[in-house]
Image (tube, rainbow, N blue to C red):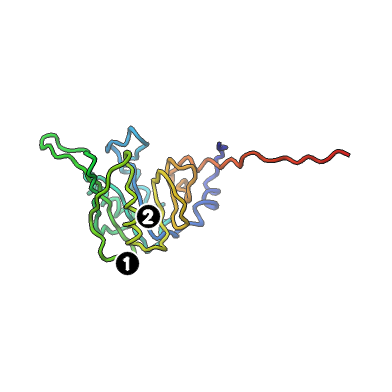
Amino acid sequence: MTTTTKPSIAEVKSSSEAPFRQQWDACLADPPWPKQGGEKHYDTMSLAEIQAMMPAIQALMKPDSWMFMWTTVGLEEISKQILGSWGYRYENRIIWCKPNRFGFGDPRIGIRRSTEVLLVGTRGNVRSHFRSQQDWFASPAGLHSEKPLEQWAILRRIVGPDARVLELFSRQRFPDTRHGFWGNELETCDVSLLPWGYPVPADFTTPDPGPTTETSTPKE
């Protein structure tokens, strides 16, 4: 159970966002792209809203950092533009092949997509810790928009075992002190984007401490 409280922007800055300014070595972002079938499953954002996250990204990430952005084949080019507007150079892409899933396609041709794209971007001076990462991998698709665990192995090979990684638009979290999580479906987040106009439910809730044991003073 949670109790609802609404902090001011100043409180959010001092308690949640400020300690994490420019502390993240890499970001894994899975934006809720519009018109890609996600509307039935979760809240989506417009392209303009996603692009306008630039100030928050700039504030949270280190000057020398990585950006890994999930997108679809149909939105790959506009996603590269958004990656650039966030302050990152597009370097390459990694293709996720889904052997058990058919997606969108052109009915005239009959070829349906069964891939998603992970864009890789950098800013500042970074260097990969692994020199032989392939640009594709195969893994079965799970629930809608759910990404395979292989993404973390790939990311860690590139950014290194000690890098601090912030996952944006996360739908679940796991215990790892090297990772931070922010998303609309999480009960708790490690950063807040509320000061930049991107609230999530976790900004307005605090964990219920649970029942307390009262001690009574003995009567004389």
> In the picture provided, is 123 more to the left or to the right than 180?
left
Name the mark on residue 190.
Answer: none
- Report x, y in % for residue 117: 25, 49
Residue at left offset 41%, top offset 54%:
166
Residue position for label 1:
127
Give the residue at the far right of this rendering.
220
| CA neighbours of label 1 inside 10 A, class few (<14), some (14 to 19), many (20+) | some
Identify residue type, mark 1: Arg
* Image coords of residue 113 (percent x, y): 19, 42
Side of 73 relative to 50 (left or right): left
Q: Circle 1 — which element?
A: loop
Mark pair 1, 2: CA separation: 15 Å
User: Of 171 and 3, which appears nearest the observer?
Assistant: 171
Residue appearing at x 15%, y 37% in the figure: 106
- Residue 206 vs 121, above or below: the answer is above
- Mark 2 surroundings within 10 Å by alpha-carbon count, few (fewer than 14), some (14 through 19), many (20 or more): many
Q: Secondary structure at mark 2?
A: strand
Residue ID at (89%, 39%)? 220
Name the spot of residue 102 as percent of width and height, x first. Answer: 21, 39
Under mark 2, the amino acid is Cys
Q: Nearer the viewer, residue 2 or 130?
A: 130
**Residue topped by disc 2:** 27
Coordinates of residue 142 in the picture (x, y in percent): 31, 41
Q: Residue furthest left?
A: 109
Going from the N terminus, do you reach mark 1 or mark 2 first? 2
Q: Is residue 218 above or below residue 179?
A: above
Name which quarter of the figure residue 24 lies in: bottom left
The residue lying toward the viewer, choosing from 169 and 215, is: 215
Check the picture and name the quadrant holding the N terminus.
top right
Q: How many marks?
A: 2
